[in-house]
Image (cartoon, rainbow, N blue to C red):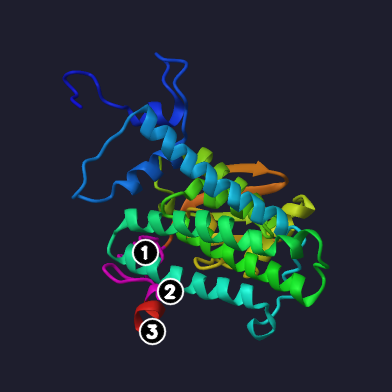
């Protein structure tokens, strides 16, 4: 492969398809990231081409299909009625034991930046143990059994843990698929409005590092679904940097206001409205934290209070 010969593969063409070759498949960003992760080693010959990308896309398709099946099954899962491990079926206990081993192996591989090993572990777990073994062993309980019984809830509780662990371990490599699982999962009705606000912030202050800004959300007059999602993800009314909402929105601090918005905000650099939620963006009031890079530190060269609590522990 040589740039001078022109026989290179443009990453943009892999993600979006080629304008010069309309028949070339658009594989998407996750497929490209999957290929990169699979070759995250310096002791193998790295190959790329249409056949390699097609094989990678099929690999991604298998992971996605298994996750879709788990999502469909979990639509009948009552998260408020989990089954404790001591009451679970032996098959479910064994799956959780294997899941714990997989989690430890992935953590070790991530610590060593062995993304190819993480991918190998993920593929083996999803293809061989979840899809090829566990789902087949529990299909009678899922399709013919009483899902409100202890045995039925045992399978659903196990699958809830399985999907959660798979989603978390795949997220650094397959962020788009992981986000899709969150949006269509049990908490999707809360996360979807927050993701909509995140996209709005990117449009309000394009080509900027949003961590240099704070956001204020005025929920007076907002649609009920959006108001409930915002107040559930952040119950604190004041500026907050460590709520679930602040974790989703790419700003330093988030403030939720319930009263009427003032006619003028001198510090606001942009204001917009989405589903009745008024969003204003202003420069962050704190200083840059050298650990999390949010502008929440009290003094120059120090880390913020949230990072201090983590480092201190």
Alpha-carbon distance for marks 2 and 1? 9 Å
**Residue 104 forms part of the magenta stretch:** no
Compare residues 25 and 188 and report the one nearer the observer.
Answer: 25
Q: Going 58% across and 55% down the picture, which residue do you hit?
A: 131
Q: Residue at x 26, y 25 (%)?
A: 8
Dot 3 or dot 1: first in sequence order is 1
Q: CA distance from mark 3 to mark 2?
A: 11 Å
The quadrant the N terminus occupies is top left
Residue found at x 55% / y 43% = 199
- Expressed as whole percent of the image width and height from the top left, the position of residue 22 reads 46, 15
Q: Secondary structure at mark 3?
A: loop
Q: Is residue 2 left or right of residue 197?
A: left
Sequence-wise, the earlier of marks 2 and 1 is 1
Q: Quarter of the image holding residue 182?
A: bottom right
Mark 2: secondary structure: helix
Q: Residue at x 38, y 73 (%)?
A: 307
Which image quarter is the C terminus in?
bottom left
Rendered image: mark on residue 306: 2
Where does the image place residue 98, in percent across and percent down from the top left?
Answer: 50, 71
x, y (%) of residue 234? 62, 65
Residue 21 falls in image quadrant: top left
- The relative height of residue 7 versus residue 129 in the rendered view (above or below) is above
Report whether residue 237 is seen.
Answer: no
Residue 305, magenta (yes or no)? yes
């Amino acid at each position: 492969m040589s740039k001078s010969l022109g026989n290179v593969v443009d990453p943009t063409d892999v993600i979006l398809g080629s304008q010069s070759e309309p028949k070339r498949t658009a594989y998407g960003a996750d497929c490209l990231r999957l290929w990169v992760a699979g070759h995250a080693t310096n002791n193998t010959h790295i190959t790329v081409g249409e056949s390699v990308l097609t094989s990678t896309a099929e690999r991604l398709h298998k992971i996605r299909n298994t996750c879709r099946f788990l999502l469909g099954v979990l639509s009948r899962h009552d998260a408020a009625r989990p089954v404790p491990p001591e009451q679970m079926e032996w098959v479910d206990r064994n799956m959780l034991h294997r899941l714990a081993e997989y989690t430890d192996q992935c953590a070790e591989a991530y610590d060593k930046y062995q993304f190819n090993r993480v991918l190998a572990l993920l593929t083996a777990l999803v293809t061989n143990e979840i899809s090829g073994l566990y789902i087949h062993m529990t299909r009678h309980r899922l399709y013919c059994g009483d899902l409100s019984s202890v045995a039925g809830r045992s399978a659903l509780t196990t699958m809830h843990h399985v999907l959660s662990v798979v989603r978390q371990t795949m997220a650094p490599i397959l962020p788009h698929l992981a986000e899709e699982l969150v949006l269509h999962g049990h908490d999707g009705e809360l996360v979807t409005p927050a993701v909509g606000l995140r996209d709005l912030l990117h449009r309000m202050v394009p080509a900027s590092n949003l961590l240099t800004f704070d956001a204020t959300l005025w929920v007076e007059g907002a649609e009920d679904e959006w108001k409930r999602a915002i107040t559930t993800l952040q119950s604190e009314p004041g500026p907050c940097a460590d709520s679930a909402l602040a974790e989703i929105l790419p700003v330093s601090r988030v403030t939720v206001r319930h009263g009427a918005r003032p006619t003028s905000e001198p510090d606001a650099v942009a204001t917009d409205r989405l589903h009745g939620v008024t969003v204003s963006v202003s420069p962050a009031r704190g200083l840059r934290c050298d650990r999390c890079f949010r502008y929440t530190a009290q003094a120059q060269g120090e880390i913020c209070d949230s990072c201090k609590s983590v480092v201190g522990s």
